[in-house]
């Protein structure tokens, strides 16, 4: 049986989003400005669909290395809003950004 990737996005989102977004990210950015910028409308339809399934979290974290999730965070991949900017963030289970990119409108 052939499986459509978009059909499985909701059930296996964390693994899919890591694999699909990793090439767009920078690893362990020390400032938000270091994050690569990607326009939302230039992302693939699959990437845009996955972005919509991720939890959204607001924070006032001054840098990606600031801890913005609680201890033992349940989230790994999130859409993070900080300083009026939107980022895709993969924490890899840590409380700060391990991989991130800036999503431009």
Image (cartoon, grey):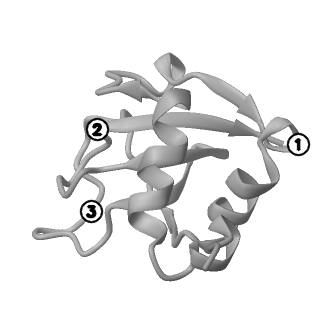
Residue at point 26%, 46% (across, down): 96
Q: Is residue 13 above or below residue 91?
A: below
Q: Is residue 38 left or right of residue 94?
A: right
Q: Secondary structure at mark 1?
A: helix
Q: In the displayed image of the protein, which residue is found farthest to the left?
A: 72
Quadrant of the snapshot with the C terminus: top right
Occupied quadrant, residue 28: top left
Q: In the displayed image of the protein, which residue is found farthest to the front?
A: 1
**Number of numbered discs on residues:** 3
Can see residue 10?
A: yes
Rendered image: mark on residue 69: 3
Quick one: 67 or 94, which is closer to the camera?
94
**Location of mark 1 (residue):** 41
Alpha-carbon span between mark 3 and mark 2: 12 Å
Quadrant of the snapshot with the N terminus: bottom right
Can see residue 60?
A: no
Alpha-carbon span between mark 1 and mark 3: 28 Å
Alpha-carbon span between mark 1 and mark 2: 24 Å
Crowd class of label 3 (few under 14; some 14 to 19; many from 20; radius 10 Å): some
Occupied quadrant, residue 104: top right
Crowd class of label 1 (few under 14; some 14 to 19; many from 20; radius 10 Å): few
Occupied quadrant, residue 74: bottom left
Q: Is residue 52 left or right of residue 76?
A: right
Q: Position of residue 76 (x, y in %)?
A: 32, 61
Given this view, does label 3 or label 2 mark the residue nearer the observer? 2
Q: Secondary structure at mark 2?
A: loop
Q: Secondary structure at mark 3?
A: loop
């Amino acid at each position: 049986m052939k499986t459509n990737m978009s059909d499985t996005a909701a059930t296996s989102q964390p693994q899919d989003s890591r694999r699909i977004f990793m090439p767009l990210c920078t690893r362990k950015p020390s400032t938000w400005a270091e994050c690569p910028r990607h326009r939302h409308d230039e992302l693939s339809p699959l990437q845009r669909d996955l972005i919509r399934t991720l939890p959204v979290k607001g924070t006032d974290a001054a840098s990606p290395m600031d801890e913005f999730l609680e201890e033992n965070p349940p989230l790994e991949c999130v859409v993070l809003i900080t300083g009026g900017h939107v980022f895709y963030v993969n924490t890899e289970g840590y409380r700060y950004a391990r991989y991130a990119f800036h999503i431009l409108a």
